[in-house]
Amino acid sequence: ADRTTPSIHSSSRPSPLRAAGITASVLAGTAAGAAALWSVRNALYPRLGRMACERAGFVTRTTLVNGHGLRFVEGPAAGPPLLLLHAQSTDLWSWAPVMPALARDFHVFALDVPGHGASDWDPELYNGPVLGELFADFIAGVIGEQTIVAGHSSGGLIAAWMGAARPDEVL
């Protein structure tokens, strides 16, 4: 007697549990690969940005402004001065991806806000108008001419304050 009763286990496709296991393995492998690429990118990204800035002619300097030590970078003099202000919890290198391109048309300066990067730490400075005055004095003492000021996040707030309160220093 020939049995033609269909089997509940088809050999032509995997069981739902096996398919779920394969899918989970593929997803886990993909997630592990993405995590590895993300880690490598984030480990190398700051270094690659700094290297690009160095190749574009940026030089790291420090100065005292009103008794406070500030680290800054200066690019080649290729146009009007441009001061870049970073956000909180970053440093001047957060601008590194765009600084070489900006240096083709501007004399770029980027500085570490006090308490960030390699600038002095002083809680007395940690409010917008005080930082705005400090950076306007940086423009007067280091750059020496009216300057375009750009910032992102809190740096943008300080740049806006500087434009309103110190138009003698800010274009």
Image: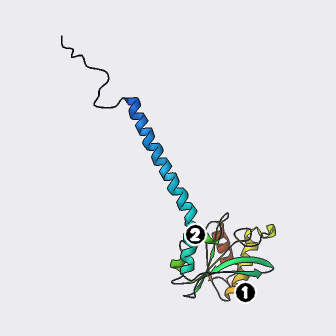
The outermost residue toward the top is 1
Q: In x, y percent, where is residue 117?
A: 69, 69
Identify the disc placed on residue 47: 2
- The residue lying toward the viewer, choosing from 34 and 113, is 34
As helix, strand or loop, the secondary structure at mark 1 comes to: helix
Horizontal side of 4 relative to 164 (left or right) equals left
For label 1, the residue is 141
Please state which amino acid type lies under the numbered disc 2: Arg
Q: Quadrant of the N terminus?
A: top left
Residue at coordinates 70% horizontally, 86% vertically from top-left? 142
Please state which amino acid type lies under the numbered disc 1: Gly
Q: In x, y percent, where is residue 67?
A: 81, 79
Q: Tell me the quarter of the picture where residue 89 sits.
A: bottom right
Residue at coordinates 38% horizontally, 30% vertically from top-left? 16
Q: Quadrant of the C terminus?
A: bottom right
Horizontal side of 123 relative to 23 (left or right) equals right
Residue at coordinates 21% horizontally, 14% vertically from top-left? 3
Q: Tell me the quarter of the picture where residue 77 sits.
A: bottom right
Regarding residue 68, the answer to whether it shows in the image is yes
Identify the disc placed on residue 16: none
Q: Are marks 2 and 1 in contact (CB under 8 Å)?
A: no
Residue at coordinates 71% horizontally, 82% vertically from top-left? 138
Q: Tell me the quarter of the picture where residue 127 sits.
A: bottom right
Q: In x, y percent, where is residue 39?
A: 55, 57
Horizontal side of 149 relative to 137 (left or right) equals left
Regarding residue 96, the answer to whether it shows in the image is no
| Within-10-Å neighbours for mark 2: few <14, some 14–19, many 20+ | few
Q: In x, y percent, where is residue 156?
A: 63, 70
